[in-house]
Amino acid sequence: MLINGKAVGMDVLSRAPAYRVLHPKLLKSYAMEAFLSQGEKALKPTAGKVKNFLSRALNCEERKYRSVGLGWDYRFLGKGMVGYALVYRKAVVHAAFFETAQAERTGRIADMSTRRGFRRGTVERNIMV
């Protein structure tokens, strides 16, 4: 997701039916984040900014935990970035990465800032997606 020309987050879902279920929540989350970012200086989006975001996501430190349900919970921490992924039978079911500059709130999937803040709490806790 780009806000004011800056890559600030992304979600990846493995299956179209899963995306259809989560689409309204994700859209609301991204819209709320954009609304809360009003007034910030808007920058021109560039492919370089997106590539930088993806490169930092790929270079995050990874930790693996048993999921509360099926599969494995992966937690990622990098310079100014957090992420998580649910993996079942070696396939990523849902993954998300976020900038952490403004991630001070904690909670569930309600908004992007909240999901960014997951990693700032106890690393070992599992979060239902």
Image (cartoon, helix red, strand yellow):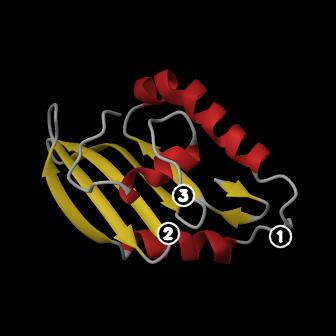
Q: Amino acid at mark 3?
A: Ala
- Mark 3 vs mark 2, CA separation in Å: 18 Å
Query: Which residue lies under the disc numbered 2?
Result: 54
Q: Which mark is residue 43?
A: 1
> Is tag 1's residue or tag 2's residue first in the polypeptide sequence?
1
- The image quarter in which residue 74 lies: bottom left
Q: Residue at x 35, y 72 (%)?
A: 60
- Residue 24 % position (x, y): 59, 25
Q: Residue at x 54, y 33 (%)?
A: 110
Q: Amino acid at mark 2?
A: Leu
Around disc 1, counting alpha carbons within 10 Å, would you say few (fewer than 14), some (14 to 19), or many (20 or more)?
A: few
- Mark 1 vs mark 2, CA separation in Å: 18 Å
Q: Nearer the viewer, mark 1 or mark 2?
A: 1
SS state under label 1: loop
Query: Which residue lies under the disc numbered 3?
Result: 103
Around disc 3, counting alpha carbons within 10 Å, would you say few (fewer than 14), some (14 to 19), or many (20 or more)?
A: many
